[in-house]
Amino acid sequence: MADPDYPSEETIAKIKEWRDTDGPGLVAFLREQWTFPEYFTVDDGIAYMSTAGWSGNEEMVEAIPPMWWSLHWRASQWGGHHILRLDLSDHRTVKITVPDSEG
């Protein structure tokens, strides 16, 4: 029996086929599927997602298309932490706020 918290094959396929310029759409879809959604926040057009070590979350991150990453990725950190920019209207500037590790 499949783990209900683990992404289905259909979910992974949908992520792999996501349109590159639809950052908000993919982030909303990922957040709906995310196990431990408290580790996936969006603030002022910046998405902060942490896999929390869950292999299902890591599989979804690995399924994100490479071109999507090249447009939206801003930073990654050891431990499965990723920062993504959703607004592609101005590629010259980006506001990144690193969340306080204690809160």
Image (tube, grey):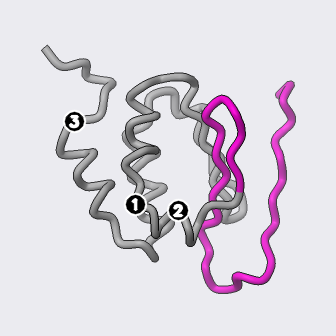
| Residue 2 coordinates in the image, percent (x, y) | 18, 19
- Distance in Å between CA atoms under marks 2 and 3: 22 Å
Residue at image position (39%, 42%) is: 60
Residues rendered magenta in the picture:
75-103
Specify whether 31 is left or right of 99. Answer: left
Residue 87 included in the magenta stretch of the image: yes
Element on which disc 1 rests: loop
Q: Amino acid at mark 1?
A: Pro
Quarter of the image that includes the C terminus: top right
Specify whether 37 is left or right of 82. Answer: left
Element on which disc 3 rests: loop
Residue at image position (25%, 22%) is: 4
Image quadrant assignment for residue 50: top right
- Distance in Å between CA atoms under marks 2 and 1: 7 Å
Q: Main secondary structure of the magenta part?
A: loop
Q: How many marks?
A: 3
Image quadrant assignment for residue 86: bottom right
Label number found at residue 65: 1
- Distance in Å between CA atoms under marks 1 and 3: 17 Å
7 vs 28: above or below:
above
In the depicted view, which residue is nearer to us: 99 or 12?
Answer: 12
70 vs 11: above or below:
below
| Residue 39 coordinates in the image, percent (x, y) | 61, 33
Quarter of the image that includes the N terminus: top left
Element on which disc 2 rests: helix
Tags 2 and 1 touching, CB below 8 Å: yes
- The residue where tag 2 is placed is 69
Which of discs 1 and 3 lies nearer the camera? The answer is: 1
Label number found at residue 8: 3
Disc 3: CA contacts within 10 A as few (<14), some (14-19) or many (>=20): some
In the depicted view, which residue is nearer to us: 17 or 98?
Answer: 17
Specify whether 80 is left or right of 35. Answer: right
